[in-house]
Amino acid sequence: MMQGSRATRESSRDKLIQAAAELMLESGYASVTSRRVAAAAGLKPQLVHYYFSSMDDLYLAVYAWYFSGLSERQGEITASATPLRDLWRMMCDSRGVMLNEFLALANHKPKIKREIAAFSSRFRAEQVALLERVVDPQSLEQHGITAAMLSLMLNSLARSLATEREFGIEQGHAEALARVERMIEEIDSRYTPPGAA
């Protein structure tokens, strides 16, 4: 039986999750082994199997940890004077490349694919609800899109740009970014944060 305080156990579990996330980001999901994760966390390898019944459970814990952070950041955006710009920055965060690793992993692991699909659907629904609160309906009409379309377009573009940069491909990036920046500036200019006069 594992000894130690609850705080110590949670700290060890968190260290393992964060170590696995860093390995995944640096070297891809195939690099995430119990030995490498434990070494990166400065813990004993058997702790990986104590906290996670399988490597799939560790992958899912990493996914939940990573996206709960994004969900929290997303929830804070409403108070910003430039919510769409802040959301776009979050989407373009360099760690967005991690999503590609999860998609690759999901292709080989049905359980992970189901969990990722369920979590991602909830996350996207939160994002669409956020956009419906912070984007002026006339702006959406002007661009001929809905909040759901805007979410899909921005997420897809951010992921594509991150993926292509990994391969050294940059054709069309500057033009796409300039167009998105103009749209974001125009939409954010119509937003009034809650409590602002």
Image (cartoon, grey):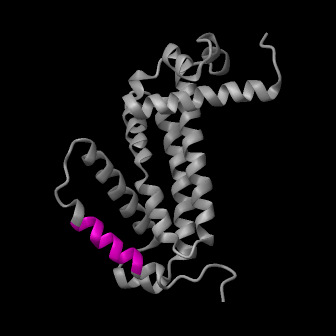
Give the side of residue 75 with respect to residue 111, left or right: right
What residue is rendered at 19% in x and 48% in y?
Answer: 169
Q: Nearer the viewer, residue 160 or 12?
A: 12
Looking at this rendering, what residue extends furthest in the front direction? 42
Where residue 48 sits, quadrant-wise, is top right
* Residue 184 picture location, percent across and down: 40, 74
Residue 59, horizontal then vertical, whole percent: 52, 29
Q: Position of residue 193 (x, y in %)?
A: 61, 79
Q: Main secondary structure of the magenta part?
A: helix
**Viewer-proximal residue among 175 and 55:** 175
Quarter of the C terminus within the rendering: bottom right
Is residue 140 visible in this depiction of the protein?
no
Please tell me whether residue 54 is drawn above or below residue 145 in the rendered image: above
Residue 143 in the figure: left or right of residue 54: left
Range of the magenta residues?
175-185
Q: Is residue 131 visible?
A: yes
Question: Which residue appears at 40% of the width and 78% of the height?
Answer: 185
Identify the residue at horizontal 49%, vertical 85% (top origin). 190
Residue 18 coordinates in the image, percent (x, y)? 57, 32
Q: Is residue 25 above or below residue 177?
A: above
Q: Pick whichever, 182 or 120, lies toward us.
A: 182
**Image quarter hosting the N terminus:** top right
Q: Which residue is drawn at the image coordinates 38% and 62% (left, top)?
A: 154
* Residue farthest to the bottom, as pictured: 197
Total labels: the figure holds 0
> Does the magenta-highlighted stretch encompass residue 177?
yes
Give the quarter of the image for residue 163: top left
Q: For the view shown, which residue lies furthest in the right direction? A: 5
The reply to whether the magenta stretch includes residue 97 is no
